[in-house]
Image (spheres, helix red, strand yellow):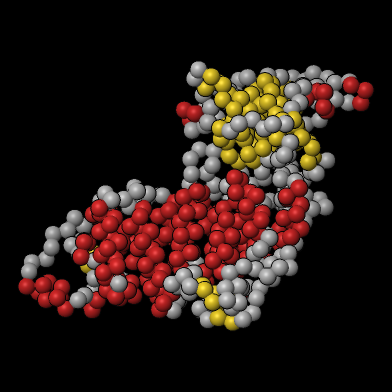
């Protein structure tokens, strides 16, 4: 690693004879920070792949990477990778080190290797805890986790819970150790061998794993990508909902359960069960997926709603409605809108998931789409659906028999500018906008 030799100090045992001799006959180099001795296992790999690493780091410098920051990144990667030397076979460990150096060299010139950044945290804190996956497919694991971390830490309206996602990814990886990877075994170099299973130690066997649907699961690379995707959706990235539901169908039962937080573990935060509902630990994975696909606001322990959740009263509507979520906001404070948005309809093709809004923006009016389910939300500019379903008079939908509206109440939300409602298996949903608020409210009347 000649390009960074002034900043990254390898132990003497890992130096080349030429560099050791040079160090004895010249004064120590002046560094911007105290030299840090690289971990022995990583240093051995760095020496063995010196030409490769030199080329990777030189390319990062050519793309504008700060030399000191790049050196710091290599140090941090070395420390994070070191424990894996005792957990992985030599080939898997070497491929993991290569993948980590590659991703650090890509993130530093892109200004994405920073304290508090989701990608740096994924490399240093999540990847080292994924030894079962790294034993099977190091490059795939590192790439999938880093790419998902960037999506998890996205902009306003699309950000997920990075901490919960990391926990679910680690749980899914450990569940893989209990439910071995099936399909084509992926070697550290990326090659595959057909119809073999890779265990956490890197050995293979011809057995296969059955997914919740009863079909044989795919090769390890696809399983890892699928589990990371499912964990991302479960942690708030609703825009991946359709793909995640499809991917979850092909995961082994234990892996799917871990990625979805259906294990009923002590750190599960889904809340107390509603009467007649099932808890996460009792739920059948396939039943949960099928029911949620039909009802995007149902999840184990949440179908009855939270008794402590706020409620609202709407003019002309009998009975309080539970507030499921508050979305949007003023652009100056990180929200999407310059002016309060108006709800104009619900997408009939995605009932309970996709809602349509209009908001003045500069000289014109812009169409917006709110995509939301029980796990997360996303607001984006988008064309209006061809067949929106809108009910701009909530009293006309919920009034008592005979068309008699509910009596006026002081607590009623009386400043509605628009609304849209749809029926779902767990109750009637309505998205409402108000003239005096940049937020829109999603409410439900449970069945």
Where is the C terminus found, in terms of image quarters?
top right
In the rendered structure, the answer to whether residue 155 lies left or right of residue 445 reads left
Q: For residue 279, say whether it is visible.
A: no
Please tell me whether residue 116 is drawn above or below residue 130 in the rendered image: above
Q: Nearer the viewer, residue 150 or 445?
A: 150
Please tell me whether residue 245 is drawn above or below residue 337 in the rendered image: below
Name the residue at the right extreme.
402
Q: Which residue is depicted at the point 52% across and 57% down?
A: 166
Counting from the top left corner in percent of width and height, residue 306 is at 72, 43
Q: Which residue is depicted at the point 63% across and 49% down?
A: 241
In the rendered structure, the answer to whether residue 239 lies left or right of residue 17 reads right
Q: Which residue is depicted at the point 26% across and 70% down?
A: 50
Q: Nearer the viewer, residue 3 or 334?
A: 3
In the rendered structure, the answer to whether residue 298 lies left or right of residue 119 reads right
Q: For residue 61, say whether it is visible.
A: yes
Q: Which residue is depicted at the point 37% across and 49% down?
A: 112
Counting from the top left corner in percent of width and height, residue 176 is at 59, 70
Where is the N terminus found, in terms of image quarters?
bottom left
Counting from the top left corner in percent of width and height, residue 57 is at 28, 60
Please tell me whether residue 146 is drawn above or below residue 429 in the rendered image: below
Counting from the top left corner in percent of width and height, residue 346 is at 71, 32
Please tell me whether residue 99 is drawn above or below residue 346 in the rendered image: below
Number of marks in the image? 0
In the rendered structure, the answer to whether residue 131 lies left or right of residue 28 reads right
Instruction: Quadrant for residue 207, please give it.
Output: bottom right
């Amino acid at each position: 690693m000649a390009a960074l030799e002034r900043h990254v100090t390898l132990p003497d045992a890992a130096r080349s004879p030429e560099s050791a001799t040079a160090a004895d006959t010249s004064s120590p180099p002046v560094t911007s920070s105290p030299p840090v001795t690289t971990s022995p296992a990583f240093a051995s790999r760095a020496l063995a792949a010196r030409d490769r690493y030199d080329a990777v780091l030189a390319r990062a410098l050519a793309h504008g990477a700060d030399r000191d920051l790049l050196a710091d990144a290599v140090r941090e990667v070395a420390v994070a990778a070191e424990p894996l030397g005792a957990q992985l076979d030599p080939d898997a460990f070497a491929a993991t080190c290569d993948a980590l150096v590659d991703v650090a060299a890509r993130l530093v010139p892109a200004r994405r290797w920073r304290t508090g950044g989701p990608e740096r945290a994924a490399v240093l804190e999540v990847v080292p805890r994924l030894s079962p996956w790294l034993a099977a497919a190091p490059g795939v694991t590192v790439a999938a986790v880093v790419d998902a971390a960037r999506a998890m830490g996205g902009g306003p309206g699309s950000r997920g819970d990075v901490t919960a996602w990391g926990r679910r990814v680690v749980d899914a990886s450990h569940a893989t150790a209990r439910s071995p990877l099936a399909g084509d075994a992926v070697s550290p170099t990326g090659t595959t061998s057909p119809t073999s299973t890779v265990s956490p130690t890197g050995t293979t066997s011809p057995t296969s794993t059955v997914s919740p649907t009863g079909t044989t699961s795919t090769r390890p690379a696809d399983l890892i990508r699928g589990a990371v995707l499912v964990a991302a959706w479960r942690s708030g990235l609703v825009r991946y909902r359709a793909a995640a539901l499809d991917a979850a169908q092909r995961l082994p039962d234990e892996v799917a359960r871990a990625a979805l937080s259906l294990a009923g573990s002590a750190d599960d935060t889904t809340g107390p069960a509603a009467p007649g509902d099932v808890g996460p630990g009792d739920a059948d994975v396939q039943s949960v997926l099928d029911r949620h696909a039909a009802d995007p606001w149902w999840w184990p322990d949440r179908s009855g709603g939270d008794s402590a959740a706020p409620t609202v009263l709407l003019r002309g509507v009998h009975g309080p409605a539970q507030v499921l979520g508050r979305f949007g906001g003023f652009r100056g404070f990180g929200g999407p809108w310059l002016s309060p948005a108006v709800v104009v309809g619900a997408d009939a093709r995605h009932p309970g998931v996709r809602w349509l809004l209009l908001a003045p923006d500069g000289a014109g009016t812009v169409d917006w789409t709110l995509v939301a389910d029980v796990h997360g939300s996303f607001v984006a500019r988008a064309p209006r659906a061809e067949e929106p379903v809108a009910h701009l008079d909530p009293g006309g939908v919920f009034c008592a028999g005979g068309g008699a509206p509910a009596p006026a109440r002081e607590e009623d939300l009386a400043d509605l500018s628009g609304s849209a409602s749809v029926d779902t298996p767990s109750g009637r949903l309505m998205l409402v906008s108000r003239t005096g608020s940049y937020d829109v409210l999603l409410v439900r009347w449970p069945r």
